[in-house]
Image (cartoon, rainbow, N blue to C red):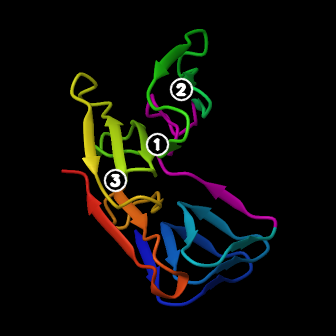
Amino acid sequence: MFWQVGSSATLGTNTVLVGSILALISDTVTTGTSVAGRVFAVTGGVTLDFNAIKAPAGARGDVDGDGKADVVWRPSNGIWFIIPSSSPNTSILQQWGTSGDIPVPGDYDGDGKTDFAVSRPSSGTWSIIPSSNPGAPIVQQWGTSGDIPVLGDLRWRWEDGFRCLSALPREARRLVSAQFP
């Protein structure tokens, strides 16, 4: 479940939320609140106060689908370091990206596993290795030079998509998005 709020959102003391919130301005998560999902704010911040936030299955950085992050990305050379939590004696190195790229890992193919992905702000190009078909990388032009990539599922399907915040002046910024084919 994904809740889209036109201004700001506040979750009261000891609230239990299963799902995610995308607020235009800000989110406040008060004491004792438990969230099984994600909390996003587009233009402002997210304030947390002694909360439990648990990522859903297929959480960002989860390459083996067990709900635990397994990935570190080195921005200087674009190498991804993976130690799958389901197989901690195995390590994987994956070259994907280069200096200046922004890592945008997510579940772009909906299989519950994180796909290696980078956004290149200088050209607005996204490059993805889908975990369901790693032999067929996807390169997608989305946005323009200087746009800011935005991560998350905005269509309530627990899948990520291409989206970026326009590099226009702050008062004219807009969120543009497209779902993975």
Q: Secondary structure at mark 1?
A: loop
Does label 3 or label 2 sit earlier along the sequence?
A: 2
The residue beneath circle 1 is 105
Q: Tell whether position 54 is magenta.
A: yes
Considering every residue shown, the one lying at the far top of the view is 89
Left or right side of 2 for 89: right
Q: Tell whether position 112 is magenta.
A: no
Categorize mark 1 by other alpha carbons within 10 Å: few (<14), some (14-19), many (20+).
many
Does label 1 or label 2 sit earlier along the sequence?
A: 2
Between marks 3 and 2, how big is the CA–CA gap?
21 Å
The residue beneath circle 2 is 80
Task: Specify the label residue 159 is tagged with.
Answer: 3
Residue 114 image-quadrant placement: top left
CB contact under 8 Å: marks 3 and 2: no
Categorize mark 2 by other alpha carbons within 10 Å: few (<14), some (14-19), many (20+).
some
- What residue type is disc 1 on? Pro
Across and down, in percent, residue 109 comes to 27, 43
Q: Secondary structure at mark 3?
A: loop
Between marks 1 and 3, how big is the CA–CA gap?
11 Å
- What residue type is disc 2 on? Trp
Across and down, in percent, residue 157 comes to 31, 59
